[in-house]
Image (spheres, helix red, strand yellow):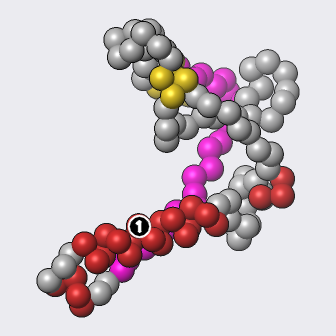
Amino acid sequence: MLVQSCFLHYAGEDLAVKFETEEHWKKAFGPVFIYLNSNSAAKTNPSVLWKDAKQRMEKEAASWPYSFPLSEDFVKSNQRGTVSGQLLIRDWFVSEKAVPRESAYVGLAAPGEAGSW
């Protein structure tokens, strides 16, 4: 059995991840946080809810990574490393210079043999 997952790529051919029979792979999602807020003042000023939700989001973001998940697939904060730097994108259709990007996701994996990610 061959499992295939396709990912669209910014430019060029689609990237496809292929797994052979008996090849171990899994992806852990979460934890997921859902915040339901309410405020009677929102009847006349709905932005009260938005401001409250934004403050809560900032609080949760500052708490990351969470320490409460018990799954062995969720790496605890004391087992994580740190990476810092700047992601620059060179897209000739947007700018002739490399442009810094925000809110991008970069996948990292533990060191290992090539292709072991």
45 in magenta: no
Q: Quadrant of the C terminus?
A: top right
Asked if residue 11 lies left or right of residue 58, the reply is left
**Against 56, is 31 above or below?**
above
Q: Residues within 10 Å of mark 1 (few under 14, many from 20)?
A: few
Q: Is residue 23 left or right of residue 104?
A: right
Residue, x 57% and y 61% (percent of image)?
Answer: 61
In the foreground, 95 or 82? 95
Amino acid bearing label 1: Lys
Specify the quadrant that holds the N terminus: top right
- Relative to 80, is 97 above or below? above
- Residue 60 against residue 101 in the figure, above or below: below
The percent coordinates of residue 96 (x first, y second) are 42, 10
Main secondary structure along the magenta-highlighted residues: loop
Question: For the magenta stretch, what is the residue range?
Answer: 16-37
Report the residue at 62% width, 44% height from top. Answer: 27
